[in-house]
Every structure is written in structure tokens, then in C-alpha cells.
Amino acid sequence: MLLELVDNALVNTAANKSLMSARQNAYNQVQSIPFPTSKDEDWRQISLKPLTSNNFVAAKSGDVTSIDIKNYILKEADASHIVIVNGFYRDDLSNVSGLPEGCFVGKLGDAPAHVVEAFEKHYSNVATYKSDAFVPFNTAMVRETVIVYIPKELKVEAPLQILYATDANENIFSNARTFIFAERHSDMTIVEDFVGKEESIYFMNAVTETVLSDESHVTHIKVQRESTKATHISRTASLLARGSNYNAYTISLGAALFRNEPMALVDSENAHATLDGLVIVNGNQVSDTHSIMDHLKENCTSHQLHKVIASGKGKSVFNGKIFVRKDSQLIDSFQENRNLLLSEKAEVFTKPQLEIFADDVKCSHGATIGQLSEDEMFYLQSRGLSKTTAQQLLTYGFALDVIENLPVASLREKLSHDVAELTTDSDVEVTYLES
Amino acid sequence: MSTLSEAQAVEVAASKKYKYGFKTDIQYEDFPKGLNEDIIRKISEIKGEPEFMLEFRLKAYKSWLEMEEPEWPNVEYEKLDYQEIVYHSQPKKKPKLNSLDEVDPEILETYEKLGIPLSEQKMLAGVAVDAVFDSVSVATTFKEKLKEAGVIFCSMTEAVKDYPELVKQYLGSVVPSSDNFFSALNSAVFSDGSFVFVPKGVKCPMELSTYFRINNENSGQFERTLIVAEEGASVSYLEGCTAPMFDTNQLHAAVVEIVALDNSEVKYSTVQNWYPGDENGKGGIYNFVTKRGICKGVNSKISWTQVETGSAITWKYPSVILKGDNSIGEFYSVALTNDMQQADTGTKMIHLGKNTKSTIVSKGISAGKSQNSYRGLVKIGPKANGSRNYSVCDSMLIGSDCGAHTFPYIESKNNTSSIEHEATTSKIGEDQIFYLQSRGMSEEDAISLIINGFCKEVFKELPMEFAVEAQKLLAIKLEGSVG
């Protein structure tokens, strides 16, 4: 069924010439790459049944009917946000007037020649790192690619918010595609925000590619607060040049099934990549993060902190791969995965993975699965807090570790409220070890 | 300073020859190559096995036919032609032996070259040696003394004849014949191995040990070991192996099963130093081993300790199923790879009972062009309340052409249990080498000292005589390598 849709999309979007060959290649790939099953090592722990059991249809319009877009726009991004609804670019809801001159954010059709050039050079090359059924599907099907271009020597103060909203009355699927190109010595913070109509069933297939030129800095925050019945599959790939600095944070709160693949291809010297994440699963939510930190050149550092709070019947999967290729000496790579397993029925699967082919490196990872500390609980209770309050406070504190690093104040605030709300859900029976 | 010496060192290491690479010239009974039902019937017949054993073998063979060789380990090798292997071999002279004097002098000489003079073993350490030369046990010492204590320690062949009930009860109970490709193959054609049974309340009076040797070109060796510790019993078992130098790859697909009942304790130690192939990766043993223990009873404990230095390919995951409440599983491992060696080894700890505990300490050392992988699974089931796991996997890299990999699978379905895992990969400390050298040590000694320190946590788990041997072995293996 999905293949027919790809066919249709090819016909529908043929007008955009520079995308056609990428689309055609991707289309061929979609036909040759088998749909992943639980027999594939990378998809072992999750079921993609929500994708096959629902009849998803392509979205027909970008009309907003039931969600309040304004409500989601960050204060700092008041004049630097764009809005895409059901895969349709909404000029009327977007406002990028606050961005400095030289910056381009928008559709390919509107882009100046030098932006198109950068786009054509890298588009779809970064995300196709490892063959996969969903990236080519996105490339073949996506209606609109959002392009973000930051000119050289420019530090953009205001964060750019890209809001992908899904709002429809039927089971729709849509593709989100973001292409970010940071020129030499540029600096920008980008917030990709995924929201949807509450309780609605839909499928969001998102791909983001970030290309960092020499000495550029990009902070990339992905906030996933989709409807708790939605399926969200995404890949966030980045390519790092000499001396560049890529800091990515993924905050996953929504979706029934969330699959995220953050990737950093550290392809030049002296670069640094951070791939942090916070996952909160509750109810029947499933969240699966498969990250890749690939060190291809010497003298680089990387950091990864992935935190998980699993309650209800939630399930969290984490596979963090760190590669250090042959002759990529002097790599300092650190990865930490901490899981808080709060309820009887929740499940956590984790597989940190190191593959090292160079000797002069310092690579380490740590993974823990556990509960709230009895000592900390006792301390708080001895100070007069009720057991529930103490549990909530500690859980909240656990999550805050990731959130407090976010450079956008209003987002920090919003997310800490959301986290507090999720962790104080009265349905969640928080347990800890009895002595 | 160290770059230069390292380069020299690698050169020296590369020229290092396998110390135990000799072949004993002994006549072999001819046995046709290949595998089919008739071959299995013949093996069973030669060994004079009861009907249930033949059925066990045939059933395993049938499931093996439907299985495929696993592709998932992080190793690359030329697939074997299983019809080119001779599935049974034994020394031709096979008299009933009453004392060591009757043993083939050539075999005794082999042991002496390996540094384990059997004739002196009795007086020495108090270790009973069930020496396996190729497929058939040729000498067993201290049998009488063990008999007094009620411990059964004999070859599998004897056990099938003398204690068929025990064998029937426990064989295949931990590693079912259809468990995996290599265990199915082993179950179909296994030649011999050791059988240990420690009855209720008995502490085995001495450490049991089997020395393995692979001889006879093209003969796969399929050992089968079964250790059963009844309620309150305890035993420590040692396995060590060296093999002579050959050009064609030899397959070793062993199966080891351990059953620990209430309050019992089994400790299994291995030093493995089989022929790893030459510096270009030619020849060498394929070591595809299935080792698994089950802590069936409450408060039982199974501890695996291994020092893996040999074999071209190692594929081995000594595991513990922690079924009884309060049971304990331990895994201590040193895996050293050099030249073209590849190792994919680790453990599985399956927590099923309440308050079960497991510890994993894995030390990987890669040198030359070798690839060394740790692959482990820690699984805590929904009923395993209050369980704990602690894992640490450290890898050390020596030289820029080798690789170290870590694949830990950690799964928890219980919210009263906790798991901790940490892994590091780093280079041997240049400043440490410098410090020791500035104190007058040669670089070689310095490295040996550092490596021994790196592996200390594992070595201290080995029985004393083995610990000494293991330390020596690492020093020999890395001689020149960085030191």
C-alpha cells in the first residue's frame, strides 16, 4: 500500500527538478529495502505493527482545525519560527523577520542560488549513512523540505523554531524533512518541535540533516511531544567538519511508538559532538533510540547522556553505538545511559556499544537500570515530605539533568513543567526498594 | 620513545612462534570423513553406548540439519566444510591402565613438554588429572581417593556405561541439543569429555582438572563435559588446553553443562592456549564453545573464570541461568588476542529467581591485527525481585591495527532490581610504562607488570597453580608485543 503512495508522490512533486534524482534514487531504494521486522538486530525490541495495522492516508491539506499553534511558539522565537502542518508549509503562520540578513529559512523554491548549491551538494547524503527503509521513504515522499542556511561568521542570537504540527481527523501520515547548513564560523540554535492533535492516530516520518562547516556551532534541540497515539520515526543525522561543534538534545515525551536515530559523523579533526537525550515513557508508550557516534578522524571528542524514566507499561530501548575508525587516534568519547525503572510492568532494554579500531583513545560507557535511591527518599521524608512528593521530586530531578542544558529559557521552563506533570501523574505508582 | 619501542615490539611479537607447536606421532584408527546417520550410529556403536544415547545423538543430528551456522558474531572466517571432518579419532593403543607406567610413553612425553608431568602430578599439587588425548581418556589419577569421598570423576564414555541414569537425567538439561548450531553438532557426534558428580553435602577434596590436547590433523574434537553438584556440594574444576601447530583449521565445538542444586557451589576455570594460527592468520583452531550452567537450587553459585589466549577464532559465552532464589553467578574473563586472532566472547546472566546476583568482570587485550569483542547479556525477569548485576568490561589496545569492541545487552523487566554496567577502552598507559622504566625496569617487564595489574581481578579468581600459569602465559603471548 505504501509503495503506491510513493508512486503517487513521484508524480505529484515532479515539478521540483533538483529533488527529482534524489527522489528517484530513494524510490528505487524503497522498493529494494525490505520493511524492518523484529528479526533485524536494529529493530529487535519493538513492533512496527501500528504502521501496518492502521490504514494511513496522505494528508490532503495543512489546515489547522483543533490545535492552537500560537500556544506552541516559544517566546524567544517570536520572530524566528516557521510552521508546517501535516507536511504543508504554512507561510501565513510563520515569521522569520527576526533573523539577521543572510540567513535563509524556508522552502527550496525560494532559496537563493548559493543555498541551493549547498543543498544539492549534501542533501540526502548525510542521512543515508546506513540503509534503512524509512529515510528513502521520506526522501521519495516528502512534500516540502525546510532549508536552514546560516552564513559564515554569523552568530544568530534568537533560536529558530521549526514547528511540525499534525492536525487531521483521519489517520494521516506525513513526512518532515529539515536540511540545516551552517557555514564557516557560524553559530545557531535550532528547535525542532513536533506536536499533534491529542488522542489522534497518525504517522510522522521525520528526517533532519545538519551539515556543519569548519568552526561552526549548531545546537539542535528536538522536542517530540506528539499525540500519545501517534507513531514517530525519525533520523537526525549530522556531518561535522574541522573544529565544529554539534550539540543535539532529544526530548521525547509523546507518541505511542517513537523511534529516533540521532547520528553524528565526526568527519574531521578537533570537532565535538554531543547527543543527549531524555525519554519519558508511561502508559503503553514505546520509545526506541538507536544512536550512532562515528569518529572518522583524529583528535575529536564526544559526549552522550541518555536518560530514561519508564513507568506504567512503558518500554524503552536504547542502543548507543560509538565507532572509532582505524587511525582515528586521540578520541575521547563518553557515553552514559541511566534508566529509572519505576513500575512493575515497565521494561528497559539497553545496549551501549563500543567498536574501537584505534589504540590511542579514551572511550567509555556506562549503563545503569535502577530505582530511586532509598537513602535520598529517606532523607526527603525525614525532612517532612510525603512519600509521593519525595518520589516525584527525585524523579523530576533525575530528568532535569538533561533539560537544564538546553540554551532556550522558555523551552527549559515549558519542558520542566511537562516533565513535572508526567512524573506526578497520579496513575503512576512509583515504587522503590523496601529495606 | 614509546612509539619506537612499540614498533620494534610489534615486530618481535609477530615473529613469536607458538611454543607448544609440535605434533606427537601416534597411529590413528581410520574413520571415514563426513557426517551422516551411519557415522553417528558407528560412533555410538564403537563407544558401546546404550540406546538412549543413540537416540539423543540422532535427535541432535536432525535438528542440526535444519540449523544454519550463526552469522552474528563479530568474527570473519572461512566457513568449514562439515563433510570434510573426521568425527571420531582415538589413539590406537587402548589397553586398560592401572598405573601411569602403562601409558604410551610418547603421550607422557607430550605432557612433559607442556610442563605437566603426569608422573609427578600425584605427589605435586594434589590435582587429579583426567587427561584427554584427542578423544579418549588415557589416564585418570586419584580416582580411588575421589571414590572414597563419593565424587564421581570419569570420562563421559565411562559415565554413560557406569552411571546411565545420571547421564540420562542431566545430559542436555542445560544446553538442549537444539540450542544452537554448534551444540547440536556436538550433541550428535561428541566423542568424550569429563563427567563430574558431587553427591549431597560433599566438598570435593581436591581440584579436578582435565588437560585437553588436540592432535591428529583434520579431526574435529567434540568434548562434552557435565558437572553436577547435588545439595550442599562444592567442586572446583580446571580445564586447560594447548594444541600443536597445524596448517588446516581445526574445529573445536565443545559443550559444557553445569547443574548446581540447593546450596551448592561450582567453580569452573579455563586456561585456553590453542594454536592461534601463524602471523598471517593461517591455520589455527576454531573454538566454538557452548558453556552454560544453571543455578537450579536456592543459594547455589556458579563461577566461570577464563583466560583465553589461543585459537584463531573464539566464540564462547559461558553463561549462568540464575533460577534458584538467592543464587549467584560470576564471570571473570581475560581474553587476549594477537596477530590475526579474533575473539567474540562474553557471558549471559539470566536472572529468574529472587535476590539473584551476578558479577561480570571482563578484560580484553588486543594486539597485532586482532579483533577482540565482548558480547554479553544481562537479563532480569519480571519475577526476579531484588536482583543485582554489576558488570565491568575493560579493553586495552596495543598497537594501532587491532580493534576492541563491546556489545553488552542489558534488559530489565523488574523494578526492584538494579543493573550497573561500565566499559572502558584505552591504550596501555605510556606514563605508567615510563614510570616503571625510570625505576629501572625493562620495557618488557613494565608492560608485563601493567598487564598483570590490568587482569589482577580475574587472576585472583583462578586456583593458585593456574594463576601462576596464566600470568606466565600472558607474558609469553605478549613477549615483545609492546614489551
Image: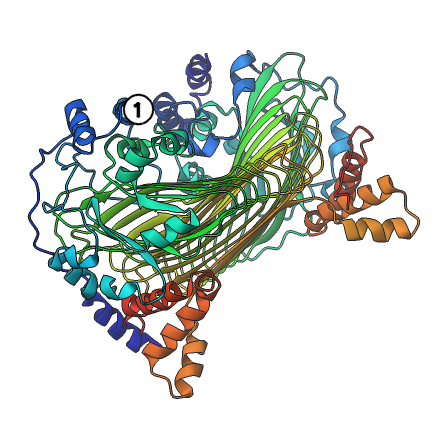
The x, y position of residue B443, in whole percent, is: 34, 79
Q: Nearer the viewer, residue A418 or B283?
A: B283
Q: Residues within 10 Å of mark 1 (few under 14, many from 20)?
A: few
Q: Chain of mark 1?
A: B
Residue A306 in sight from this viewpoint? no
Measured as percent of width and height from the top left, residue B366 is found at: 34, 60
Instruction: Decide which of A291, A70 is in the foreground and name it.
Output: A291
Seen from the viewer's position, the closer of residues B458 and B268 is B268
Residue B430 image-quadrant placement = bottom left
Asked whether residue B153 is in view, the answer is yes
- In the rendered view, tell whether residue B121 sits above or below residue A403: below
The coloring applied to the image is rainbow
Residue B32's image quarter?
top left
Q: Position of residue B280 (x, y in %)?
A: 17, 56
Q: What residue sits 77% from the left and 42% below the top?
A: A75
Camera-nearest residue between B446 and A118: B446
Direction right: furthest residue:
A384
Which residue is under mark 1? B52
Q: Quick check: B470 above or below B165?
A: below
Residue B450 is left or right of residue A417, and the answer is left
- Quadrant occupied by the N terminus of chain B: bottom left
Q: Position of residue A234 (x, y in %)?
A: 54, 33
Q: What kind of residue is marked 1?
A: Phe
Q: Secondary structure at mark 1?
A: helix
Q: How many marks?
A: 1
- Which quadrant does the C terminus of chain B fall into? bottom left
Query: Which residue does the image show at 58% across and 38% down from the upper left?
Result: B324
